[in-house]
Image (cartoon, rainbow, N blue to C red):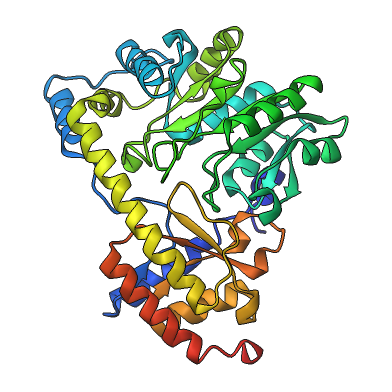
């Protein structure tokens, strides 16, 4: 008799792109050159000053637990970062260091959503957000969004989809998979709408720092009671170090600290010491040079894909993704991704991973490769399109 696992486990969907990644790795093992545009991880290694700080922490014996809220020095450094970058006075006591941005989301979900209640989320959006809600026996109310609202929730959409079981909304700016950014005025309007309904406002700011031609405003500039999720993974390039943070209203901190103590004790100690180097001038200069490189990649890949027939109605202003409509090319997104991988060895993510609304007509490109590598990818995609026969799939 097969084992019986929990309903919540069965309800949480896998990352569909992982099957594609496994196939890509098998092709590589067989000697094929695969261009990876599917995984949302910067191709740059962690900046040398951060690595050196981590090595120094190991040498100094910093291998024990920290307080559940994180190293005081790191929370103070983040407070200073908010002051310099956004002009905000954020008390370090309001900042909790977490195991990745995922740890911040888990804390927020556990604190704010009772079983059966829900947050409103944009569809398409990052899939783990809805899965964390399921983990705490809550739900995600997915709201279909498209180019007309830059793939973002609006006050009108919140009013339209709000129900008695709604307790808040989780936004993302810049967003994954679309790269769109909410303006200060848009954040203020969303905040006012939720405040009028007594709802919580949460904003995923994980891709802050990776914007092009503008600086993304923090929701804390317009709403000091909002919850902010962030991470050292994207702009700071520390994906494998598993480190993030949560900014919360002061009144919520004791409950969040209690949850942190029980759920994970503390974030990785060595990673916290390494992250102290993130805010040094030399490190920030490296990170800003990388941001400029991402901008060059976007500025190459966006028009190149449009010329091939991919429809990208909203120019992404941040992150490192292009969310492309393949309707004009015909066929299903998963079949197209499989065709692209098998025939030309280019890996991209099908829209199914990001929600349900028109997901079969979209794919996501991650421009986490160099411009010469992207040029190779575009040439291969052009060849794949010449023999793409969706009706034959």
Whether residue 4 is visible here, answered yes or no, is no
Residue lying at 34% horizontally and 52% vertically, measured from the top left: 294
Horizontal relation, residue 366 to residue 55: left or right: right
Image spot of residue 210 (x, y percent)? 40, 42
- Quadrant of res 299: bottom left
How many marks the image carries: the answer is 0
Image spot of residue 365 (x, y percent)? 47, 63
Is 14 placed above or below 96 here? below
Is 98 placed above or below 3 here? above
Residue lying at 61% horizontally and 55% vertically, measured from the top left: 354
Depth order, front residue of 141/122: 122
Residue lying at 63% horizontally and 78% vertically, measured from the top left: 328
Whether residue 242 is visible here, answered yes or no, is yes
Horizontal relation, residue 49 to residue 7: left or right: left
Could you tell me which quadrant the C terminus lies in? bottom right
Depth order, front residue of 250/20: 250
Residue lying at 55% horizontally and 42% vertically, measured from the top left: 181
Could you tell me which quadrant the N terminus lies in? bottom right
Image spot of residue 141 (x, y percent)? 76, 42
Depth order, front residue of 140/138: 140
Is 361 placed above or below 243 here? below
Image spot of residue 385 (x, y percent)? 50, 85
């Amino acid at each position: 008799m097969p084992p019986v696992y929990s309903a919540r486990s069965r309800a949480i969907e896998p990352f569909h792109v992982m099957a594609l990644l496994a196939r890509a790795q098998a092709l590589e093992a067989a000697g094929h050159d695969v261009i990876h545009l599917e995984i949302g991880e910067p191709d740059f290694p962690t900046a040398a000053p951060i690595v050196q700080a981590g090595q120094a922490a190991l040498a100094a014996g910093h291998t024990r637990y920290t307080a559940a809220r994180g190293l005081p020095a790191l929370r103070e450094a983040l407070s200073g970062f908010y002051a310099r970058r956004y002009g905000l006075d954020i008390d370090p006591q309001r900042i909790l260091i977490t195991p990745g941005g995922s740890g911040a989301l888990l804390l927020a979900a556990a604190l704010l959503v009772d079983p059966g209640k829900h947050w409103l989320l944009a569809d398409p959006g990052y899939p783990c957000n809805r899965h964390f809600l399921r983990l705490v026996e809550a739900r995600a109310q997915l709201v279909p969004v498209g180019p007309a609202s830059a793939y973002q929730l609006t006050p009108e959409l919140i009013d339209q989809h709000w129900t008695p079981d709604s307790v808040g909304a989780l936004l993302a700016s810049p967003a994954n998979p679309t790269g769109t950014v909410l303006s200060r005025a848009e954040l203020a309007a969303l905040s006012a709408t939720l405040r009028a309904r007594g709802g919580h406002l949460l904003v995923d700011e994980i891709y802050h720092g990776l914007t092009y031609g503008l600086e993304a405003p923090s929701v804390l500039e317009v709403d000091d009671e909002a919850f902010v999720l962030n991470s050292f993974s994207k702009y700071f390039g520390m994906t494998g170090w598993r480190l993030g943070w949560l900014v919360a209203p002061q009144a919520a901190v004791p409950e969040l600290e209690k949850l942190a103590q029980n759920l994970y004790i503390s974030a990785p100690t060595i990673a916290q010491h390494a992250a102290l180097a993130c805010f040094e001038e030399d490190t920030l200069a490296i990170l800003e040079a990388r941001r400029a490189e991402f901008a060059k990649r976007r500025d190459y890949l966006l028009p190149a894909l449009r010329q091939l027939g991919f429809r990208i109605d909203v120019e992404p202003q941040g992150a490192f993704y292009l969310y492309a409509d393949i309707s004009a090319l015909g066929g299903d997104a998963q079949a197209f991704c499989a065709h692209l991988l098998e025939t030309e060895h280019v890996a991209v993510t099908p829209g199914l991973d990001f929600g349900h609304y028109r997901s079969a007509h979209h794919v996501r490109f991650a421009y986490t490769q160099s411009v010469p590598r992207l040029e190779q990818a575009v040439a291969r995609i052009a060849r794949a399109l010449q023999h793409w026969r969706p009706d034959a799939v």
